[in-house]
Amino acid sequence: MSCGQNEPFALQVLGDSMEPEFVEGHIIIIEPDGAFKNGSYVFALYQDEYIFRQLVIDNERYFLKPLNDNYPTLEIETLDPVKGVITQRAGTRRREHKHYV
């Protein structure tokens, strides 16, 4: 059985670009049809690579911002690269579980 294009799916966080909120090994749930807004955590396609960042909307300009300052903030022309919104985070301990709206 395969997942539909609009079905939620889970991915494991790799790397440290979204620390301290999301550390390597956390599991994130992505909702392809989820509503996003300024400040949402999103899954996006940027230069043929899928990335996980925080969406920043500023005066009709769109940015994909890492939480770790060692990585650059990326400007995107439209919201088309955004492929889903992160709705949950899970870690190895219950206290690491969190929901996002």
Image (cartoon, rainbow, N blue to C red):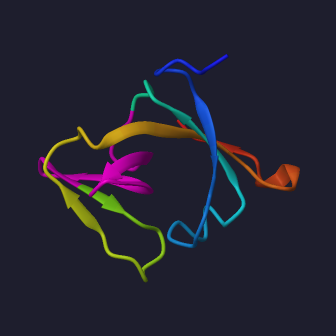
From this view, report whether residue 23 is shown above or below residue 83: below
Residue 90 seen in this snapshot? yes
Query: Residue, x 43% and y 36% (percent of image)?
Result: 84
Query: Residue, x 43% and y 24% (percent of image)?
Result: 33
User: Residue 36, how many percent across, how many down?
Assistant: 38, 36
37 or 64: nearer the eye?
A: 64
Which quarter of the rendered picture does the N terminus lie within? top right
Instruction: Farthest residue to the right: give it.
Output: 93
Q: Quadrant of residue 87?
A: top right
Residue range in magenta is 36-62
From this view, report whether residue 101 is shown above or below residue 44: above
User: Residue 7, how many percent across, how many down?
Assistant: 55, 21
Magenta stretch encompasses residue 20 = no
Magenta stretch encompasses residue 38 = yes
76 or 46: nearer the eye?
A: 46
From this view, report whether residue 37 is shown above or below residue 95: above
User: Residue 94, how many percent across, how many down?
Assistant: 86, 49
Instruction: Farthest residue to the bottom: give it.
Output: 70
Residue 40 seen in this snapshot? no
**Relative horizontal placement of residue 18, taking residue 50 as reference (left or right):** right
Q: Quadrant of residue 51?
A: bottom left
48 or 76: nearer the eye?
A: 48
**Relative horizontal placement of residue 57, taking residue 66 as reference (left or right):** left
**Relative horizontal placement of residue 68, taking residue 83 as reference (left or right):** right
User: Residue 61, how many percent across, how many down?
Assistant: 14, 52
